[in-house]
Each structure stands twice: as structure tokens, then as C-alpha cells.
Image: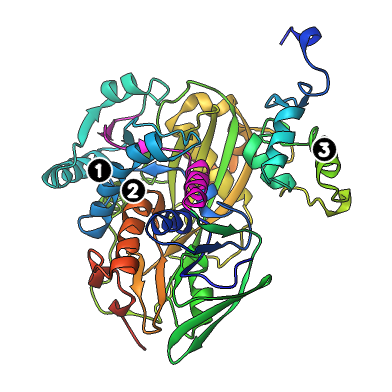
Amino acid sequence: MGRGAQMNEKEDIIICRCEEVTRKTIENAIEKGGDTLDSVKRSTRAGMGLCQGRTCQRLVARILRDKTGKPLEELTPPTFRPPFRPIRLDLLAQEGYRIRGGNKA
Amino acid sequence: MKRSADVIIIGGGIIGCTAAYFLSKRIHNVVLLERKDIASEASGANYGMVWEQTRQPGYDLVMARRSLELYPGLVNEVFDIDIEYEKKGGMIIFFTEVERKVAQVVLLSRQKQGIPLQLLDRGEARELEPALSEETMGALYCPDDVQLNPMLTTMAFARAARKEGAEIYTETEVHSIKVNNQSVRSVVTNRGEIKTEVVVNAAGSWASQIGKMVGLKIPIYPYKLQSFVTEQIPHLLSRVIQGTHIAKDSTFEEALQGFSYTRDTGAGQLSLDQEPSQQGTLADNSMMYCKPTVSGNIVCGTTFEFVGYDRSTSYEGLSLIAAMAKKAIPALKNIQVIRSWANFNPWTADFIPIVGETEVKGFIVESGHGTAMSHGPASCEALADFIVDGKPMPFGKQISIARFQKG
């Protein structure tokens, strides 16, 4: 962004780096009634990026705890789905070629 | 929570939220109950295609056309969030001579129904979508087809319904429905009981479970669709691309099903006891979809599997989808896949939804739409006219549960 110095540290701090979602955006979503990790994710895209929330999820959980008073243990994480790390599509397709009868079209 | 309602809608997907909107415009005291959150199931996980070219003559096509008329007004005047509504046209690509012959048959029959379908050659298709494989032989293209973000659309309807006065309770699960004298009396939830004389079962793939609560068998079954999404790669594609049975070389019949959604409906009597069964391999039951989202990710699918409510994804299924996607769009091969999921679409034996009142007075079904993003607005507009004015629904007999014979 290159304008870090001008940013309001508390509000404009980026929580989800993949999708560039700020603390302010997440707090607004919670104020509008999104009181679960999943609803914050769905309304702000925090955790929908390349790392799938592996970096930001705990930060979002803490913001949720602070805003709603819910203890961290009650904040169920959104469903994790394969792949556990990003995988190149070509690599994933190998088995699919076999199913097509070896036709590597 | 309210103690009574004029109408209770069960299900916070596109059908339930659309019904809540159209009903609350007409009457007070509309309540919607959703056991999870708005758009938690199929309405948050589908491809958001509002296509005319694959709709069948009759209810299916009439509903899709009416919805395409309604959406622009909703987008411009009603919704307060952007649903990423784009009239980009829909494209079905093909690779073989057999498929090209089928495409010509489909072209003529669809044009007769007034659908502005075009048959593109390889050059024309790749001019519209330069990322398509050089192997693409051609494509059917309908410029009127629309794509939208299904999750945001469902949320937009929910917000619009709330503005009209509807009460929407999420994380509220229906435990039972009280019936007296074959008439609906109340709905019991984990948060209390609400009196009502009218219930709309908009539970989609779960509609049969709600039906059981009033002693009705509703022949709607879930089928599973696996999908995955890639990292962001903006501008690779402009529109949703559908393929035929790319996972294998299609026969004429298979290609015809793939292009036009025509299916053998059995011609004989529909039975309440008819259950779906999986025929053929996973490759036989898969079709390629690649959808560019506004955020730049590309969603790829899909399989069609009858496995009950098992929502796991499989290596075999995801790999097949990857192989299909790469065949259609070779540039995808170096792109990272970041997440997979499975969702359920509702299935009926004749691929027509079940809509209308049942033998239990006040118990109305509005479920089984395999293409609910296309049907929703039109179907729920008609539903509101039926509930408020008693106006018969279009194609009432064709969509009624009464078409299924008791065993």
C-alpha cells in the first residue's frame, strides 16, 4: 500500500493479508450482527484468500471475542476443506487423466 | 421471537428469502426460520447461472424468463448490496464431431422457442474467451444469459425482506409442526413455538425431512456436487463456461443431455416411492463448469452424485474436475487450487420442482428447484399471489405434488 504511515494504526491495520481486510471492516461486520467466524468470513472475505485463514483466523477470533464477549473456545472455526496447502491444478488433475482412460488431452 | 405469524417460511436459501421478500411486500407478519445462516447451503455454493439456453419448455423456461425480467428492477431499485449481476452471456463449449452435430440440433429447437442462441465456431468462441483451448471445436452461446453471485443475491433478498417487515431467525431449527384436523397450527423450534396457519417448506434438499413432520412424503432427494476454487487470476475468463461430458467422449444422447438438460423422465407414472440411483461412473456423472468470480477466483466443477447427505469431497472427484478444467482452459494448469467443497442440489424424478399446497391445509411446498437462482424470483412472485389472493399458480398441475402416485 505504501501509505502505512498515514494509516490509523488501530482501524486500518490489515488482519487478513491475502484479501486485504482491515480491522475496521471486520469490526463493522460484527456490529452488523455477524457474530461467528463463518459469518465474518462470508461478509468480509477475511480468510477466503490463498492461505484460507491459516494466518488471520486467530486474529479474527480475538476481535470477535473482544467485540461480543464470547469466549474463544465457543468460536467454532469455519470448516477446513482440502487441499491443506494450495496445490497446482495440473498436479491435482493427474488422477483425473487416469479416469479418462489415460487420455492426456 | 414472535408468538404468531401469518406465514412461516422454513429455509433461508434463495427460495425462502425470495418468498419472504415477495410475501412481506404484500402482508404483515412473515417469519423465516433458518437452522444455520442465510445461504449456508446450495444458495451459497452454486454457480449463480441464470441461463435461458438450458431451460426446458414449460414451467422451467417461463420461470427463467420471468426471473430475467425481474432481476434488473430488483438490482436497481430494491437491493442495497451489489449482487454482481452481469449479463455476460452463457457459453457451452464442445470438442468432438458428435457434440457439434448435437449442438446443431439443440440450436434449431432452442431458436424455435425464441431463445437467441448462436452456434460459434472455434475462432468466434476464442475471440470471446481467448483462454479457451485450441482444441475447442465450437460453442453454443446465448448473449442473454446472466451470471450473479448466488450468496450475495440470497443475502440481498433477505435484507430486502427485513426492510419490508419480515422477521428472519437464523440458527433456529424446526423440531416439529403441529397439525390439527389436517390443518397447520404451529411450528415448534429450538427457540419456542410460533402459531401459524400457513407454512412454506423451502428447505430444498431437506424438504422431505420437513414433509415428514406433517406426515407427508415429499419425493425430493439430495445430489452432491463437488467443486473447487482457484487462487485469484483476474481477467482469464469473462463468463461462465460450461462443457459437455468432457470427462469422457460423449455419445449423441449424453451430449444432448449435457447441452440441453433434457433427461429421460421415464414417461411412465411418477411414483412417490421412486428413489434416485447412481448410474455409471463418476466420469459419466460429471460436467465441466468454470466460473470467473468478480474477485478473480475461478470456481470449477462438478460431479453429480447420489450419496445421501455425505458432504465430503473426494480426491477422485476433484481430480476429475481439474482434468476437465485443464482440457477446456489449458492456462489453468499452473494455477493453485485453494479450497474444495461439496453442496447438495435437490432432485425430483422429472427434474421439475414440487410447488403448491398439499393435502395438509396450509402446508405449502416450494422446493426441488435444481436451478433456483433462475426460478426463484418468478416462482416466489407467483407463490405470494397464491397465498395472498388465492390466484392459481402457473403450471399448477405440472408442479403439484399430486403428480406423484401413491405406492
The lab-note entry on whether marks 3 and 1 share a chain reads no
Q: Mark 1–mark 2 contact, CB under 8 Å?
A: yes
How busy is the neighbourhood of tag 1: few (under 14 within 10 Å), some, or many (20 plus)? some
Q: From the viewer's perspective, is A104 left or right of A75? A: left
Q: Position of residue B121 (x, y in %)?
A: 24, 27
The colour scheme used here is: rainbow
- What range is drawn magenta here? B136-164
Q: Which residue is mark 1?
A: B98
**Which residue is at 30% across, 25% downward?**
B125
What amino acid type should be assigned to the residue bearing mark 2?
Ser
Residue shown at the point (74%, 8%) measured from the top left: A3
Residue B350: percent from the left, percent from the top?
Answer: 31, 67
Q: Which residue is mark 2?
A: B250
Badge 1 element: helix
Q: Are marks 3 and 2 on the same chain?
A: no
Disc on res. A63: 3
Between the C-alphas of marks 3 and 1, the distance is: 57 Å
Rendered-image quadrant of the N terminus of chain B: bottom right
Helix, strand or loop under label 2: loop
* Camera-side mark, 3 or 2: 3
**Observer-nearest residue: B306 or B187?**
B187
Residue B402 visible? The answer is yes
What chain is tagged by disc 1? Answer: B
